[in-house]
Amino acid sequence: MTITTDTVRAAIPAIGDLAADLAEAVAETWRRAWASSPYESLDDAPFSGFLPQRSLLEHVNNVNVQAARLIEVAAAQYGLPVDHDRALAAAILHDVDKLQIFRWDGRDFSIAEGTSRAEHGPMGAALALECGVPEDIAVLVRDHSQANSPNLLPASAEAAIMLYADMTDADLASVRYGTEPSFRRSRPVRRS
């Protein structure tokens, strides 16, 4: 199968809600990640090691829906000036590197040879930058993972939107599948 940015846009509809140049950079980031992965379909890529049977694509699309809702809530209920494209693009891209890091053959989950869980976030951010995604969005992608932001306290409305859209979907999926929710797997947050 030839993977194009149109293929990616069809799989991740929220890309169409971004400004044209940003949408192209986001779609190209996903295209490159997918083309260099072992997955025939984005539905084959695992969401996580604790729920590998759940597809990454389902997670990403659910996060995008939640992020769009939270963007509206932040503006309407809190009067926050949220950069829609920044928040939504970060949500769309937050787990793009899992295509390179996670392996799932339908039975066994593993980490790809030559990679580590600690690369989740930085690897996606680097690829996004290579594809023309602005640095402020790439920083949100880089810093969303507990491996790279141990305190995980969002520094902006856009970071909070991405974080809580991600965690809401992850925890609801955990409840659905009977696995331990992230707040029980997480480290305590330290405030300085």
Image: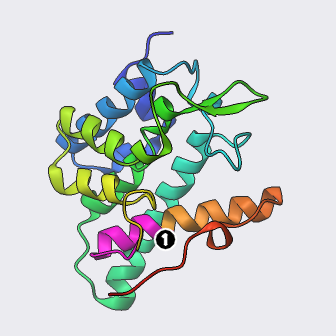
In this picture, residue 122 sits left or right of residue 170: left
In this picture, residue 38 sits left or right of residue 73: right
Q: Position of residue 140 (x, y in %)?
A: 29, 59
Question: 188 above or below 126?
Answer: below
Q: Position of residue 42 (x, y in %)?
A: 56, 30
Q: Position of residue 66 (x, y in %)?
A: 51, 64
SS category of the residue bearing label 1: helix
* Closer-to-camera residue (27/122): 122
Q: Position of residue 189 (x, y in %)?
A: 47, 80
How many other residues sit within 10 Å of disc 1, few (<14), some (14-19) or many (≥20)? some
In this picture, residue 19 sits left or right of residue 95: left
Q: Residue placed at 40% from the left, 55% from the top?
A: 91
**Which residue occupies the extreme top position in the image?**
1
Residue 20 sits in quarter:
top left
Which color scheme is applied? Answer: rainbow
Can you see residue 40? yes
Question: 159 above or below 24?
Answer: below
In this picture, residue 128 sits left or right of residue 63: left
* Closer-to-camera residue (186/129): 186
Can you see residue 14? no
**Is residue 155 one of those drawn in magenta?**
yes
**Is residue 13 one of those drawn in magenta?**
no
The stretch in magenta equals 152-164
Q: Residue placed at 73% from the left, 60% from the top?
A: 174
- Label 1 amino acid? Tyr
Assign the magenta stretch its main secondary structure: helix
Q: Quadrant of the C terminus?
A: bottom left
Q: Residue placed at 21% from the left, 44% from the top?
A: 22
Question: Mark 1 highlights which residue?
Answer: 164
